Amino acid sequence: MKVVVVGAGIVGAACAFHAVAAGLDVTVLDRGPVGAGTTSRGEGNILLSDKEPGPELELARLSRELWDEVAAELGPESVEFETKGGLVVASTPEALTALHAFAARQAESGVRTEPVERPGDLEPHIAPGLPGGVHYPQDAQVQPVLAAAGLLRAAMRRGARTHTGEAVAAVTGTGGRVTGVRTADGSVLAADAVVNAAGTWGGEVGRRLGTPVEILPRRGFVLVTEPLPPMIRRKVYSADYVANVASSDAGLETSCVVEGTRAGTILIGASRERVGFDTAMNPAVVTALAAQACRLFPFLRGVHLIRAYRGFRPYCPDHLPVVGPDPRVPGVVHACGHEGAGIGLAPATGALVTAQLLGKPWRGADPAAHTGLLPDRFLTTGGAPK
């Protein structure tokens, strides 16, 4: 089977990695460099801690298992894979009660959770007086561009091909079925299946393939400090981050997320706002994120910021990625709309897409666990979720 994967970010790379390992003939196309889109603008989070029980959490649990395998093959150091764990903290007793209830639901779904009475025992530099939190030992981090490049290199060693600077312009078909894709220069690549892994541009690629899905950009900022000695051991964030991730509000939302990197810098997020593809710097966002981080870790008041970067998460209105074959055009398979979770969900997305291409179950996983991710939820509303 010949497969064209549109998108050389982390999700497209994972799709290529798994598809070629299963013996498929794979070509990856992207209009830009490897990992240059949303992948290059993220923190590299591999999280279970922020996901409600349901199909996305099931995908995240499968993906967490696969990240260990991927890191073992690529080399943990080469992709800066760290099983550091996550700490979610509450600022009020009421927020702590809600956090404990949320963690209990996650635990029932198989997530390891550990209540924390004194956050300072795990993070000595955290603000004193916090009422408590929850430790998630399965949370991890990876350097996303290194990971995308590593997955693609591994796929290419097995025979995959990668072409950058080639945007997909159209799809050809016989009897409604995909037979290939036409690139911007007019050439046609034969394909039995096309995987839409175009991230924030997944909606546009879907329209070009005759399978529209409502994927929208949701802008986010990340602040980067000067390099420091190790000060923060885990990914640490406030409990309201989970609510912001699940929110559909178009306006600006910020919630504190802080973590260190191998290079010694500290990453500070996270913001969300729906402003289209507006790339403008917003000083108010930088100010809000810095203030929240300083309240969580007071030592940051004396630390310099060296830069702030921003990018666009591929947002779907029902907050679920779109993963699976599209019945409107046989041969089109979607793997996009992961919002801010694409790094963490990429390996399982790639494995699931490969299983769908082959018509086989993946590792005996219950197919019903993934039905909520299928694109047929868009069919009755012209591209928006039912």
Image (cartoon, rainbow, N blue to C red):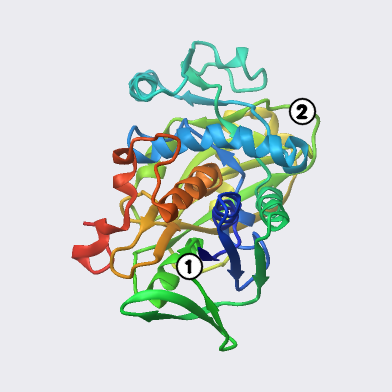
Numbered mark located on residue 201 in the image: 1
Quadrant of residue 363 within the rendered picture = top left
Which x, y percent locates residue 82? 68, 32
Question: Mark on residue 121?
Answer: none
Q: Earlier in the sequence, mark 1 or mark 2?
A: 1
- Near mark 2 (Cα within 10 A), the count class, few <14, some 14-19 or many ≥20, is few
Q: Is residue 342 above or below residue 196?
A: above
Residue beneath disc 2: 230
Nearest the camera: 320 or 75? 75
Disc 1 crowd rating (10 Å Cα; few below 14, some 14-19, many 20+) is many
Q: Position of residue 218 (x, y in %)?
A: 45, 58
Residue 89 visible in the picture: yes
Vertically, is 127 above or below 32?
Answer: above
Q: Secondary structure at mark 2?
A: loop
Q: Nearer the viewer, residue 319 or 309?
A: 319
Q: Is 118 situated left or right of 326 in this image?
A: right
Residue 86 position (above or below residue 157): above
Q: What residue is at 68 percent from the left and 60 percent from the top?
A: 159
In three-dimensional space, the C-alpha distance between marks 1 and 2, rounded to whole angstroms, equals: 37 Å
Residue 217 position, x and y percent, is: 45, 62
Q: Is residue 178 left or right of residue 191?
A: left
Q: Nearer the viewer, residue 343 or 128?
A: 343
Q: Which amino acid type corresponds to the residue marked 2 in the rendered image?
A: Pro
Question: Residue 362 location in percent, x, y?
Answer: 44, 40
Instruction: Select label 1 or label 2 by which is in front.
Output: 1
Choose top left, top right, bottom left or bottom right for residue 263: top right
Residue found at x 60% / y 87%: 185
Judged from this view, the residue extending furthest toward the left is 380
SS at mark 1 in the image: helix
Amino acid bearing label 1 = Trp
